[in-house]
Amino acid sequence: MSLVLGVDSSTQSTKAVLVDASDGTVVAEGSAPHPSGTAVDPRAWLTAFDEATSGLLERADAVAVAGQQHGMVALDADGVPVHDALLWNDTRSADAARDLVAEMGGADACAAALGSVLVASFTVTKLRWLRDHEPAAARRVASVLLPHDYVSRHACAPGTDAFTDRGDASGTGYFSTAQGTWSPDLVTAALGHEVALPRIVGAGAVAGRTVSGQVVAAGTGDNMGAALGLGLGAGDVLVSVGTSGVASCVSATSVADGTGTVTGFADAQGGYLPMVTTMNAARILDHQARWLGVDLATLSDLALASEPGARGATFLPYYGGERTPDRPDAVGTWTGLTDATTREDLARAAFEALLCSLADAVDHLAGATGQEPRRILMVGGATRSPALQALAPAILGRPITLPPPGEYVARGAARQAAWALAGTTAPPTWHLADTVELRAGLTADPTAYVREGYARLRDRTATW
């Protein structure tokens, strides 16, 4: 039996799964925490990788790493970080994003060149911020990697050239998704000088080998890894409810949305993964539970004890800014609170805000691709909440499929490792079992009223 190791280097932790390459059965797992914050020393990820894969890597025939997208890992000529890695959720580069879009000729021109309109999460905006605010550090930058690139090279034998895949590269802001090539002039424009960029490794190809000779695959971004791990197919929409909220689908053609709502990413299989991302998802519930002084289970009970529309209480959950819509300086906003508003209503409004935001994301995705969702797969720890399960089908307007809990980003990395190991033209077929189908019930009606109230608040605050 061949074993492969998939690693998810996420915002919060490193998770590793050792699986049977033939069918994806998990044999063993490991994990290690990451430092908190939106700017961290990337070397901590290497320590976490070593800890999480201890006792697993030596058993594997191949390994691949999927990681959080967009993070800026800026290295000097000796490969040492010149600055903490600025992560995807660090919005200090919002002004830089606006400047770079203007320099490219506006949003439509930016989307045509890259597949996406730059926002603060993209790597290139962080390089411009570094140039403007930490010029001494910026001048020392010799190469720029993404988080998964940095960890993947660590897994390889010394002397291996840095590498990435087109999926994760498509979130940098200096990669043409449609052409599949770097645009190094955009790095130079942002940072002020040329730097080395990692080589692009094709889907299913061998990128390198460990010091012991095991295959190392290209790896990818976390969203691309999840799509691969879940076996996302035509007509499927994946909605991930994690730290961020993400709606994505696979596509045979690239997307270039000049409004900036849909990001035109590449996927990990040679196609495309158009995506709509919100910065605020599960943490909406975490904040609400903390303010009400309850745990998440009690928050769910409170929400289900209220009524649809939360008796008029409506919430716009833009903590620390938002990406979709692009409002990096926005804050959370409540409306409709009265003397009659209860704790139950406040809990309900938080769940409805989360789901309305995700429903908007799904609608934007369908509009940009012309593909009506055949089914929606919803993943993430928050999907275990009874309130979310009860409300999601009606607010999103479609049945919801819940795959069984699992580390799907790591599973996708493992599937990619198995693909590279086999040397086949397509990844192995791994089936999911024990999925749950959710349909709208009385507790979720009326959907239209809930979404219309949310939309009014969203639109009214557009210029706040």
Image: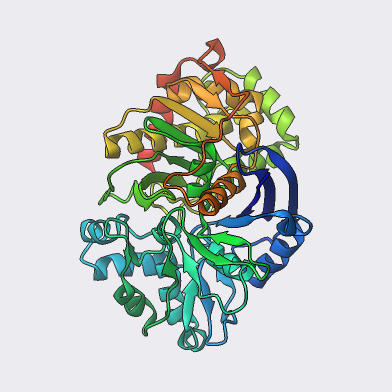
Nearer the observer, 15 or 56: 56
Does residue 440 sit above or below 123 in this rendering? above
| Colour scheme of the picture | rainbow
Residue 407 sits in which quadrant? top right
Find residue 410 and report its horizontal and vertical position in percent. 61, 48
Q: Can you name the residue that lies furthest to the right here?
A: 55
Instruction: Point out residue 20 in the picture as x, y percentages from the top left corner.
Output: 66, 42
Looking at the picture, tell me which residue is in the foreground, 7 or 330.
7
Is residue 463 among what the camera can see? no
Residue 72, position as x, y percentages in the image: 50, 69
Q: Which residue is located at x 65 percent, y 33 percent?
A: 405
Residue 270 position (above or below residue 344): below
Marks counted in the figure total 0
Which residue shows up at 75% across the image and 51% down it? Answer: 30
Residue 81, compared with residue 21, is above or below; it is below
Q: x, y (%) of residue 415?
A: 55, 46
Q: Examine the rendering and report whether any part of residue 399 can be seen.
A: yes
Judge left or right: residue 47 versus residue 86. right
Q: Nearer the viewer, residue 238 or 294?
A: 238
Front in this rendered view, residue 393 or 147: 147
Residue at (32, 69) in percent of width and height: 99
Q: Quadrant of the N terminus?
A: top right
Say whether residue 115 is left or right of residue 417.
Answer: left
